[in-house]
Amino acid sequence: MNPLIAKLERVAILTDDDHEAITAACRDVHRVPANKDIIREGDKPDHVHLVLDGWAARYKDLPGGTRQIIAYLIPGDFCDLHVTILSEMDHGIFALTPVDVAYIPRTAMIQLTLDRPSLTRALWWATLVDEAVLREWIVNLGRRDALERIAHLLCEMHFRMKNIGLVHDDRFDLPLTQDEIADTVGLTAVHTNRMLQTLRLDGLLTLHGRVLTILDIDRLRQLAGFNPNYLYATPVRQ
Amino acid sequence: MNPLIAKLERVAILTDDDHEAITAACRDVHRVPANKDIIREGDKPDHVHLVLDGWAARYKDLPGGTRQIIAYLIPGDFCDLHVTILSEMDHGIFALTPVDVAYIPRTAMIQLTLDRPSLTRALWWATLVDEAVLREWIVNLGRRDALERIAHLLCEMHFRMKNIGLVHDDRFDLPLTQDEIADTVGLTAVHTNRMLQTLRLDGLLTLHGRVLTILDIDRLRQLAGFNPNYLYATPVRQ
DNA sequence: CGTTCCCTTGACACCGATCAACTCTGGTGG
DNA sequence: CCACCAGAGTTGATCGGTGTCAAGGGAACG
């Protein structure tokens, strides 16, 4: 099952035709090994990239050697819908795990949106949710302390992974090193480590071998100030 | 002159018909006094709001009484294109100055995008630039120190204001209190004050009476690590 | 002419960064 | 099967950037 179809169907009504159009667009699948770039800053790809399996991360490198992770991409997420319109990538995307990526030709994407208003609307919903996530990350970085930031990130990924059926018993794959978490929440790896220990000691979660188990989602959400409304897991307005 | 038309024409070719359609859509103008909400979290507006004159800010309040400003809206910017699709606002927007806001009916907006593919493409470009700005703000909050953050914000607003013709001799209206700047860059007002003084002492800028004069844009940009590529002031791909 | 924001300043506290080991784990090759 | 190794996680000591609290000053406005 195509994860994009599954994602869009949660919020919109797609016809069989739409299904076929999406499936057809996703014919060209590439496997990218872990820790390799899917796209680099400055690229002008002729394809739109869609994550079918695995995790990827959007990031920017700064002069000085630091890095900020800007988004996590999980199955069903587009890497770069915007290069349909914008001139080039202003950031890179790398694979956190081995990732299956569908290469959808730019022209096919444009055709899809011209032919299928309801599908276009669903795709638009997806980009708006991505945008809402960016806003919440700004709040996270700007106004929450270290412990809350990490807790909030974990709550969000729990919610998103659950949405696509990849959470069982509040347990899911979190293929991130503590360095990567640190580069996401604007902390150092050392402090991230200490905060994760605090969360463990408080009995909120366990995390080893890239598997996260949330032991008390209610308390974790309360600690993080997590409110999933920004993820808009609700039907699209007609 | 409608600032939305001016903005879109910098990157796309619009017909006279497009102009008229935009002008017609912007008939219903409301003036919102400074410090009043234009939209609140939870609202389900039937109109899309477009800033015609003045500054507004997108924000989220947190339990605990803190606030994070998520975006600044200047003439030509939409407040909430997304409520065309999403169920309700997950954040508020307030006026920083008295603001002229065009209320564009949701239905008119939908009609516009159905009838005018090239205009739709230009609007899409605008939302993608907004998204790129959000990404850069995440980098700003996550990986730059206090001085760099403020410098970067000022560089960005200088660039955006220049783009719409509101900068003369590197001088422009910056209608923000230090509290508001602090709530934007994730600092306290006290520390924001000290950093602004540092920037002044370094001969980079002057700021009083809500007017910012940048004395040395090159050095300010270098200090901030500012690269305007993310603002995509370039023509839209066809 | 007083009131209310807003800006400014100083002293001090503390969260998270930095630096430098050390441990653990999983993978690889002999 | 074991020895080794690299990457990831952990720990401790110390430093510094930013927060906090409190007070005072200045400018706009009724």
Image (cartoon, coloured by chain):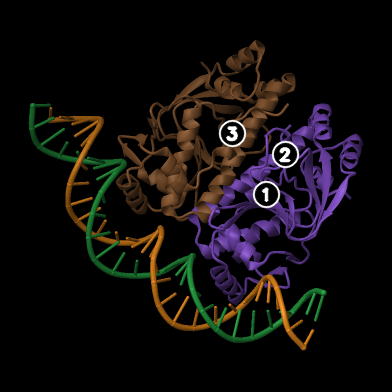
Chain colours: A brown, B purple, C orange, D green
Residue topped by disc 3: A80
Where residue A48 sits, quadrant-wise, is top right
Look at the numbered discs 2 and 1 and tell me whether their residues touch, using CB distance below 8 Å: no
- Give x and y (percent) for residue A220: 42, 43
Closest to the observer, C20 or A234: A234
Q: How many labels does the image show?
A: 3
Name above or below for residue A13 compared with residue B129.
Answer: above
Question: Which residue type carries mark 2?
Answer: Lys
- Give x and y (percent) for residue A54: 44, 28
**Numbered disc 3: what chain?**
A
Quick one: SS at disc 1?
strand
**Numbered disc 2: what chain?**
B
Q: Residue B177: which numbered mark, if any?
A: none
From mark 2 to mark 3, how far is it between C-alphas? 29 Å
Q: Which residue is drawn at 60% across and 65% down?
A: B220
Q: Residue B44: which numbered mark, if any?
A: 2
From mark 2 to mark 1, how far is it between C-alphas? 12 Å
Question: Which residue type carries mark 3?
Answer: Asp
Q: Residues within 10 Å of mark 1 (few under 14, many from 20)?
A: many
Residue topped by disc 1: B92
Closest to the observer, B71 or B220: B71
Report whether residue A89 is seen.
no
Name above or below for residue A9 compared with residue B216.
Answer: above
Q: Which residue is drawn at 67% across and 49% down?
A: B92
Look at the numbered discs 2 and 3 and tell me whether their residues touch, using CB distance below 8 Å: no
From mark 1 to mark 3, how far is it between C-alphas? 28 Å
Closest to the observer, B212 or A219: A219
| Number of the front mark, 1 or 3 | 1
Quick one: SS at disc 2?
loop
* Left or right: B70, with B8 as reference point: left
Question: Which residue type carries mark 1?
Answer: Gly
